[in-house]
Image: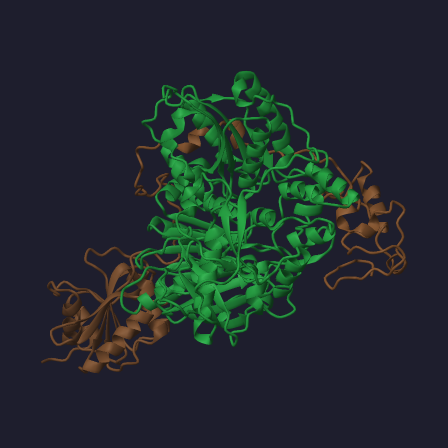
Amino acid sequence: MRRCLLFEWKIKIGKLPNFLNYATGTEMEQEKLLVVTDQVAVSVSAIFDAVKVVRKEGVEQIDPLIITQASLDSLLSVESSSIDDVVSICKSLEFPSDQLLASLSRVLKPGGRILLYLTSQSEEANSSLERKLLLAGFLDIQSSGSQSVGVIGKKPSWKIGSSFSIKKTSQVLPKIQVDDDVDLIDEDSLLTEEDLKKPQLPPSDCEVGSTRKACKNCTCGRAEAEEKVEKLGITMDQLNNPQSACGNCGLGDAFRCSTCPYKGLPAFKLGERVALPGNFLAADI
Amino acid sequence: MDEKFDEQLLILYASQTGNAMDAAERLGREAERRGCPSVSVLSIDEFQPIDLPNKEAVIFIVSTTGQGDNPDSMKGFWRFLLQKNLTKEWLKGVQYAVFGLGDSSYQKYNFVAKKLDKRLSDLGATAIIERGLGDDQHPSGYEGALDPWMSALWNMLDQKNHKLLPNGPDFVSLDATFIDQPKIQIIYHDVEEGVPPLSSDTELKYLEMQLERARSMTPGNFSGNDRPDCFLKMTKNHLLSRPDSGKDVRHFEFEAVSSSIEYEVGDVLEVLPGQSPAAVDAFIRRCNLNPDSYITVQPRSTENHHLLNQPLSPVKLKSFIELTMDVASASPRRYFFEVMSFFATAEHEKERLQYFASPEGRDDLYQYNQKERRTVLEVLEDFPSVQMPFEWLVQLVPPLKTRAYSISSSHLAHPNQVHLTVSVVSWTTPYKRKCTGLCSSWLATLDPQRRVFIPAWFRKGSLPPPPPSLPLILIGPGTGCAPFHGFVEERALQSKTVSTAPIIFFFGCRSDRDDFLYRDFWLSHSQNNGVLSGDKGGGFYVAFSRDQPQKVYVQHKMREQSMKIWSLLSQGAAVYVAGSANKMPSDVFSVFEEIVSTESGVSREAALRWIRTLEKAGKYHVEAWS
């Protein structure tokens, strides 16, 4: 078999490998194919064999862009999303590197295919190659070829970085299965508009000592009145020598008025010290 | 008999916590005092709605729960009334009146009474007077509305149907000689009949027996009057919250001692609390009772035959009090004060008690008694000259009620055990006294080393157990996480043998270090392909309300996960909400409205209707406790 160098082959079919053509996006009728390899040179038959794996149909009409000793720089001039198929013919498992693989992904059209083809056949190599493709974000990964010589992957068919609306303003809500009691009326229909309005709290009688407190910007005088009540809080003197003008304070909570300073304390006898129960809380003491 | 109608005033009440029952009983007494020939006061579930057209006059006293729902006792009656095939003539000729007990701080204020009023009118019944709406927010609670409404009722009844109130509508003033009769009678027995001597292995049997006897004798029917499903023994008592954090939340584990137990996740455990021995003794001393005497309690009137069918075995007086009468926790009702006034020998006490029982003194009574949560013992000690006969005490002392807690364990994961997550309730009264909840603090003081037997019942709550294939959206801040602890335990177990659907769970608490309940449990299930893990399509999100200047609650976390929630909802997920905050369920509902509306692009109203449909389809459940 005659060994020809790359350029010879290309000359044979009348075309020079022209990076610039690809780079400027010259239209070609057939699907664009990129072949990369870590080797210095690669034979045409090797390329044919590899391409046959990824393209089932005849390979006579191919016009691949071939990059030997491919590195990251090699792809700088290749336009993004311009390649239909990528074939990587590799001798070593390290090729292509993760970064190169990412670049290959970049130049691939969405939905485009990539084949990692090993010149030396090895069963274990396939799983390593599959992982490589998986981590690089390719889909539909599978071993291919008659003797599982390569691993094919597919670039996802949505463009990276494209955005589309997640909100489906479809105006349709999922249907719910209701075991309806068709025999009963809808009880919500018994309520009127008035019923459904937020209820108004009953007007406060603003009674000092009830649970309602004065507002922060009180203008009705309730705040002053409350302050007065607070000042009536119990003192030590009152506890030691309790007196009662009305005479009811000592009788216990049941007889005390709402402003009584002894509120909450047990009953006592006038003049005798008031026993503070263990559970009593008073702010001033 | 040719009469079309029964000559009777029928009062039906639907009570959740006893307030509506109390109001109904008062209404009945007032009717009797005005000479009504025949008054009947019944819980609405004791009445067959099919008999409604035969009644002359029916008064309804109905409570609305915080979520706008009927009390449990009314559910059957209401379903009957909603039937489409009832015509608008069905209740023709029946006079009715409705009084509702509600709370105006809720959106669904008195919905039950409002709907009932409309439905009865639509079915052809005639309203005697406009419906009355009692409001917890009123300075004297529901009685603020009840008093004027009742006066109006008596006046109208007198005009429309004089034979119901032959004495006229005016209030017969209370004088010193007029007193009702107690509804029950007490028989004292000389010797204990047929009880084997106490020994350690029959200690449980003894309790069982005393409990059964005592609770079958108590007047009125309420939860926990039937035999306990089992007796439990506490095996673990762990503090879940940080000490000194201001919260006391416990994890309790129990074992069944008497029989095997059965329950599902989402179920509720009802427990009969023990009372403080000191309080019980103080009550017995105060009331001059002999703790060792044996008694049976029977209804005085001969109408209620069903209670007399079985011969009652006597029970020890002290046991009867311990097991059925709440002496140191619940507050007595207005009627208690009225009856006390007859038995007060000191003049100033008698006056004060009569004042409290009168319409003028109603607000002051409310301040002194209800708002302050005065216990029976405290009230009796505040009026030392009152000596009430035991019959009256048995009738009027609030019954010792069971307390219900959501079960936090999965029976599959813990056979023969049941676990609870309980927050010890404590608060400061308006008079600045510190109080604690009876049952929660009692449970917290129990020592697993000591043998204390706890009567318990298993009940269905509002949270049906989900099948493993149902995706779940769970929202449970604070102790609301309890039932979901059981859900996750169970699903984790199920995932070992069948494929399970994802769960996303929103938890909330004050701070990471204070009260992040079951922290390790939730975290372990959100990693390593656990049922809450992202890998499984699930999620676990915590809102720490106080760990930053602005408040962050579960609803804020839910908004952050809007898309995920919508995704699960679209897959047919069910929503479960549980917790103890008043407004939390409605806040969560609002966020769902927002999420559905935003993610699907429909209007807020359409979203609201869609979620309502979810509720009707049994895909949206709320368990809220106060």
Give B64 or B507, whichever is nearer the viewer. Answer: B64
Image: B525 above or below B353:
below
Q: Outermost residue toward the top? A: B159
Image quadrant containing the C terminus of chain A? bottom right
Q: Is residue B617 visible?
A: yes
Quarter of the image with the N terminus of chain A is: bottom left
Q: Quadrant of residue B465?
A: bottom left
Pinpoint residue B472: horizontal percent, then vertical percent. 38, 55
- The residue at 17%/82% (across/down) is A121
> x%, y% of residue B511?
59, 64
Comparing B519 with A13, the one in front is B519
Colour green, chain: B
* B273 up-or-down from A40: above or below: above
**Chain seen in brown:** A
Check the image and report above or below for B107 versus B3: below
- Along the viewing direction, whichever of B496 and A123 lies nearer the viewer: B496
Q: Quadrant of residue A73?
A: bottom left
